[in-house]
Image (cartoon, rainbow, N blue to C red):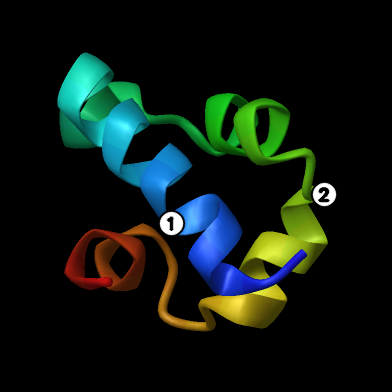
Amino acid sequence: MPKDTYIPCLLQLFRQYGYDGATLTRISKATGLGKASLYHHFLEGKMRWCKQ
């Protein structure tokens, strides 16, 4: 899945749940990406996702 496809999804999660509430499990379910795949795309973790 290309980044432009799941970045709007990430934004929605952060808006809806806030930084602490946008858990890796929620992000994984919403994007359809496994947790390992998420870290592959964003090595710095959730903070990097917010900056995207």
Point 55% across, 53% down: residue: 6
Q: Is residue 23 left or right of residue 30?
A: left
Residue 17 in the image, given as x and y percentages of width and height: 25, 17
Name the one closer to the observer, 45 or 1. 1
Point 62% across, 28% down: residue: 30
Q: Amino acid at mark 1?
A: Ile
* Mark number displayed over residue 34: 2
Estimate how packed mark 2 is, as few (under 14), some (14 to 19) or many (20 or more) residues with alpha carbons within 10 Å.
Answer: some
Label 1 or label 2, whichever lies nearer to me, is 1
Question: Which element is circle 1 on?
Answer: helix
Q: Is residue 2 above or below residue 14?
A: below
Name the one closer to the observer, 21 or 31. 31
* Mark number displayed over residue 20: none
- Quadrant of the rendering where the N terminus is positioned: bottom right
Which corner quadrant of the image does residue 39 belong to?
bottom right
- Quadrant of the rendering where the C terminus is positioned: bottom left
Which corner quadrant of the image does residue 15 belong to?
top left
Q: Is residue 39 above or below residue 32?
A: below
Point 30% across, 21% down: residue: 21
* Mark number displayed over residue 7: 1
Residue 43 in the image, given as x and y percentages of width and height: 53, 83
Which corner quadrant of the image does residue 27 belong to?
top right
Question: Which element is circle 2 on?
Answer: loop
Residue 19 in the image, given as x and y percentages of width and height: 20, 36
- The answer to which of marks 1 and 2 sits earlier in the sequence is 1
Q: Is residue 31 left or right of residue 19?
A: right
Mark 1–mark 2 Cα distance, whole angstroms, equals 15 Å
Q: Is residue 41 above or below residue 36?
A: below
Estimate how packed mark 1 is, as few (under 14), some (14 to 19) or many (20 or more) residues with alpha carbons within 10 Å.
Answer: some
